[in-house]
Amino acid sequence: MARWREVAQALREAIAADTYPPGTKIPKEEELERMYGCSRTTIRRAVAQLTAEGLLTPVRRGGTTVREQPERAVLALDTQAHRDEIGYYFSQTVQNLRALRPPTVTHGPCPPDIAPLLGLRPADPVVVRDRVLGDPATGDVVQLATSYLPADLAASTVLAEADTGPGGIYDRMETDLGWGRLDWEGVITARPATPEEAELLRLAAGVPVLCVTRMSIATAGAAEGRVVEVNTTRRDASRVEIRYPITRAATAPTEV
Amino acid sequence: MARWREVAQALREAIAADTYPPGTKIPKEEELERMYGCSRTTIRRAVAQLTAEGLLTPVRRGGTTVREQPERAVLALDTQAHRDEIGYYFSQTVQNLRALRPPTVTHGPCPPDIAPLLGLRPADPVVVRDRVLGDPATGDVVQLATSYLPADLAASTVLAEADTGPGGIYDRMETDLGWGRLDWEGVITARPATPEEAELLRLAAGVPVLCVTRMSIATAGAAEGRVVEVNTTRRDASRVEIRYPITRAATAPTEV
DNA sequence: CAGTGGTCTAGACCACAAC
DNA sequence: TTGTGGTCTAGACCACTGA
């Protein structure tokens, strides 16, 4: 076994054994160097691994701290779209969160992971609506939300404007653009944070984010049958879990 | 900006621009060293980052390949438990997968991420039932499935035996142990792969895995109200997505 | 079987934030 | 101010595996 793996394992066990309880600092790198009899590079490789695993958070000048296991926010899975006099309403995205900065609307190429959901090719032009949500009390960024709309459908419409008016983009699509009653489908994925996400969410680059994505499908008009919007929300995967009820089926399973 | 970040960004862009299309190899490290005018350590730092992001897969002696964006397996969310004459049935776990090795049953400490779900403390004794599932055609490991049962409930029962008989552990719990009709709840999380998971699933250490977990709650007998089992399945997050339908609520949302 | 990525060393300088 | 982690270099040897 590689030396750095041995050191990483030793540190893992020391943390599990409460030699270094959560919230306390592990010895500084120079000291670990002596303790394990290897070079600083090897120590750093081991510490980097545990950081990627979410066990440690190094801070410049402040030492390296054993991460408190964070409270996971428990989200209920949104399997229903609600509606009131103001507009459509998906409960999950609003739990104690507020927009920390004004939403932005830009035009750009479609990211490769979104393109298949929209039925586009990667880099096809899309309208991008970005929101940054967080805890208004602390100012911490908690969730990133982005909507992608095919440029050929949305570019010159109200959907590409910053303020989409009462009821939001879904009302515009259904009522003003005549795209019919929207169908929705949810998709859950996880992937490493992009550098941009890592910076906004204050994560180490490459740690997992959990993505909850909603596709909106038009049922009438010029866009009938097309996915007209993909909305994807991302959070630090270590701080969130999604729960859903499991019921008993009345009947035997249908064969696929 | 750090040099290794610049190199990583340059490589990212070269990959996006199809200078290095998926499936082809990027230049070897020594060559990148010359191309970017920095030391091999810096090159390796950049390549390691892109590997963590799932863009590259280095192979010894074989060079470093741009990863083909893998087909994502699309899983339907199991919100229903089915039942036939054989036993309970959760559709997702059986899609084209077979056990690649005999299930194992061991006793050990409860992992810290499972303990809260079971209402236990970390390291409390549990019975662990492990299964390794994969594609029978290729022999590739695709999914890891583990059940945890509190030792104080399961240790001396049929639940701790390798063969739990017809209908599996759920029938034993409901019928033989008299724990009543089980309630279930689902939990979805993502986290970095543990070293063991990384080895079995052939992943780089620390890349994200998507976890679909099911809690079983007894409604009668000695275990009434307790979570009597936690079943967690893990897959390479880059190769899976979970889909679920979103319906329109008949009524306005209930206030929380 | 040789070339590739994997590991490791010893040393240096830097930048930032806690003190 | 200064000690900590962050970055980088130049060089060496190893081990696996695919040409």
Image: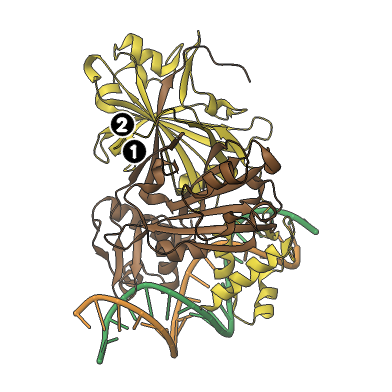
Chain colours: A brown, B yellow, C orange, D green
Dot in front, 1 or 2: 1
* Residue plotted at (56% across, 40% down): B241
Q: Secondary structure at mark 2?
A: strand
Number of residues whose C-alpha sits closer than 10 Å to that of mark 2, classed few (under 14), some (14–19) or many (20 or more) = many
Q: Is residue B75 left or right of residue B218?
A: right
Numbered label attached to residue A191: none
* Residue plotted at (35% across, 9% down): B175
Return the residue nearer the eye: A137 or A166. Answer: A166
Q: Is residue A130 above or below residue B2?
A: above
Q: Is residue B247 above or below residue B62?
A: above
Q: Is residue B155 above or below residue A229?
A: above
Q: Position of residue A78 (x, y in %)?
A: 44, 37
- The image shows a total of numbered marks equal to 2
For the residues labelled 1 and 2, say whether their Cβ atoms are less than 8 Å apart.
Answer: yes
Q: Which residue is mark 2?
A: B126
Q: Secondary structure at mark 1?
A: loop
Q: Is residue B199 visible?
A: no
Q: Residue B124 sits in which quadrant?
A: top left
Q: Position of residue C2 (x, y in %)?
A: 75, 67
Return the residue nearer the eye: D16 or B197. Answer: B197
Number of residues whose C-alpha sits closer than 10 Å to that of mark 1, classed few (under 14), some (14–19) or many (20 or more) = some
Residues flagged by tags 1 and 2 on a common chain: yes
The answer for which chain carries disc 1 is: B
Q: Position of residue B146 (x, y in %)?
A: 43, 32
Q: Amino acid at mark 2?
A: Val
Q: Which residue is mark 1?
A: B114
Label whose residue precedes the other's in the sequence (1 or 2): 1
Image quadrant holding the C terminus of chain B, namely top left
Q: Amino acid at mark 1?
A: Ile
Return the residue nearer the eye: A139 or B45. Answer: A139
